[in-house]
Amino acid sequence: MPESNRLILITGVSGFVGSAVARALGGRGYRLRGLVRSGSSPVNLVDFPGDLVEGDLRDAAAMDAAMQGVDTLFHVAADYRLWARDPEEIVRNNESGTRCVMEAALKAGVRRIVYTSSVATLKPSDSGAVDERAAAGPSEAIGAYKRSKVVAERLVERMVAEQGLPAVIVQPSTPIGPRDVKPTPTGRIIVEAARGKMPAYIDSGLNLAHVDDVAEGHVLAMEKGKVGERYILGGQDVMLGDMLGEIAAKVGRNPPRVRLPRGPLMPLAWINEGFTRLSGGSDPFLTMDSLRMARHRMFFSSAKAELELGYVARPWRQAIGDAVDWFRQRGTIQ
């Protein structure tokens, strides 16, 4: 069977990264099947180049049905929240969903799997960029989301070692760019900064990657990645103040000048979370876990993916520009 005729299943195709992966694969002419949850936003599904099926990742019967005839699986879907009223819900969702999907793939005889993990599974270091060797244990992860990704990644690794799961693991850093519908936590920072609602910032840093480059990295992992190996799909290391300054320049605002210490913000974050729990409002922008994470500079190296996969990332300022342009087109920012 020609490579372009094999059926590829992608979970999370309505989401930010999943929809980008679908476009990258569709552009190469692959036959695609996309898995979506009931009630998913239709925005990124309008031009999906394949068939869509509905199902919950934790539903074994639905996963068995979705996996029929599938040669290659991209498991991109995840519960990507940095805060929840019940934090353990995030851990349960990502662990049980990953287990169910991978068991269905094994049962169906899927030949190749690309599993989307995250740099959240790595231990940060303030002495320089971290690579794939800095694997964290669940107790070393900050917050429920990071712990959930550690637990799920270790599950995949065990299944590779013990059950012959044919999975390659990719670890995106901080994807930004167009079609961030929800938006993601980082997309929310871009929106708030563009609206002028972030007049100050914390001394922290992160690794920014264009979502379309991350998607290309997924395809390269399918084509060239080694089973059981982990590959960071990142971009450039950027200080938060520089990121906010670039956003301000894109929208014609003055950049934030005030750099705040984390300590005095902790009580405010605690109050913010408590108010959200009581009021039933949307997720708080400032959380205890986000401040704990901000203590470290989240800098990462994609050298392994560059060497072994041929991965390339465009400049981070271009990614910021594409994100801002898309939010403008959507009317999210002016």
Image (tube, rainbow, N blue to C red):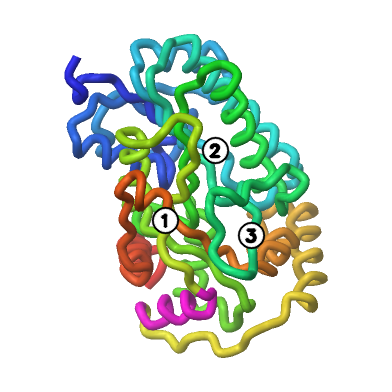
**Residue 158 to residue 164: above or below:** below
**Mark nearer the N terminus (2 vs 1):** 2
Q: Which residue is the site of mark 3?
A: 124
Between 141 and 129, which is closer to the camera in this rendering? 129
Q: Quadrant of the N terminus?
A: top left
Crowd tier of the residue under label 3, counting other residues whose Cα lies within 10 Å: few below 14, some 14–19, many 20 or above:
many
Quadrant (top left/top right/bottom left/bottom right) for the C terminus: bottom left
Residue 6 horizontal side relative to residue 35, left or right: left
Give, as a three-letter code, the residue at label 2. Ala
Q: Closer to the camera, 57 or 282? A: 57
Looking at the rendered structure, the secondary structure element under dot 3 is loop
Main SS of the magenta segment?
helix
Q: Is residue 50 left or right of residue 274?
A: left
Q: Of the two numbered discs 3 and 2 on the same chain, state the one appearing first in sequence.
A: 2
The residue at which mark 2 appears reads as 78
What whole-number distance in Å separates the C-alpha atoms at marks 1 and 3? 17 Å
Indicate yes or no whether the magenta region holds residue 172.
no
